[in-house]
Image: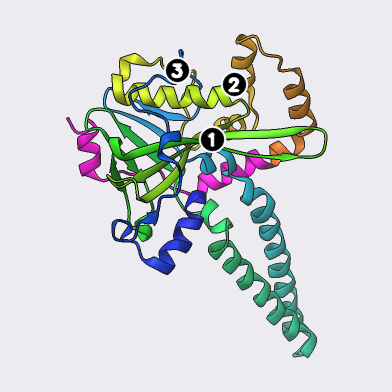
Amino acid sequence: MIHEYNVAADCVKRGTDFFSRPHGFEREEGKAFSHEKKAADVPGMAEAVYRKTNYFLETTHADEYAARGEYTAMMGFPLIVMCGFFVYMAFLSVLDIGVSGFNYYDLLMILFSLVVVVGSVWVSNYLLLGNDWFSYRHGAVRFNCKAQKVYVFYSPGLGGVRGYQWKDMLAYIDKAGVHDGSVDSNFYTLKFYACDSERKNYYDSFKIGSSFSRYEDCVAWWEYVRRYMEEGPDSVPEPDWYLSDRLSIKESFLRWFPLREMKRDKARGLDVKKAQGRMALMSPLLIFFSLGHFFSMLTSKKVKWPESIREVCGERR
């Protein structure tokens, strides 16, 4: 999965037993959100939810939500076309040798084509593209309000599912953006740290949900998660929509064309004309990314939680 790229690099250096190799926690604990104190009057902006039950709320890693299909569109499709071309050229060279006899030109073309194809396969498996293909369809994170646990899904090669106590989770809002001299473009994401009881080390960190252009919306997302865990499922409204990990071309296009988000923002009284204009201008690229998302989902499998996790989440009762 996309969000596992840096985790995999860390596991190569330090192994997969994350509880025996914590990182030093350097953020100021006092700036983390309080589990008991209300952060916003109205919880909301739950736009990256896969399931909400009386036992758990399942969302996804922010990188998976934001970048799924991007690497396939920008790297994968060009590599497929290039490999197809060189396979065709190698096939022509083999035919030419069969008709005209052996010659070094055709042999070099066959060898060169083989190097290109093998190199492309290596790139697709060991660089970022390998996390977009043949993995899992979303970076699942479950907040279990009954057991007061947080479960984070990782691939088996990285140690599998990780479980943490809710009381040990510290949440912050991270800001990322650019400044081009005239306009600031900032995005806010909700980031969790799984800390030890003394708050000196942490075992894991991850950003959940989507990125928000408004700080207040990101706070509302935290408030949604907080109330769900602290006050129960009935304390928060149903999400405006649910994400799906089914193979769906419609879902793939809705992930890159923010039609649902703009409809909701318009209902909130916000001006969406600029966003509509940007979407129209970027539509050729967004179509390409949507197809990349669909291909990424096509080659990946659904997340399957262990039976023990499913049972504690009320799925085996």
Q: Which residues are magenta?
A: 289-317
For disc 1, the neighbor class at 10 Å (few under 14, some 14 to 19, many from 20) is many
In the rendered structure, the answer to whether residue 48 lies left or right of residue 309 reads right
Residues 247 and 207: in front is 207
Q: Position of residue 286 (x, y in %)?
A: 70, 37
Q: Is residue 46 visible?
A: no
Q: Does residue 297 belong to the magenta stretch?
A: yes
Q: Position of residue 99 (x, y in %)?
A: 76, 83
Tags 1 and 3 in contact by the CB under 8 Å rule? no
Examine the rendered structure and indicate whether residue 134 appears above or below residue 85: above
In the rendered image, which residue does mark 3 sit on?
43
Task: Identify the image's colour scheme: rainbow, by chain, secondary structure or one colour.
Answer: rainbow
> Of helix, strand and loop, which one carries label 3?
loop
Q: Residue at 35% across / 50% down in the picture? A: 200
Of the image marks 1 and 2, the number of the one nearer the N terminus: 1
For disc 2, the neighbor class at 10 Å (few under 14, some 14 to 19, many from 20) is some
Residue 189, label in figure: 1
Residue type, mark 2 in image: Arg
Q: Quadrant of residue 215?
A: top right
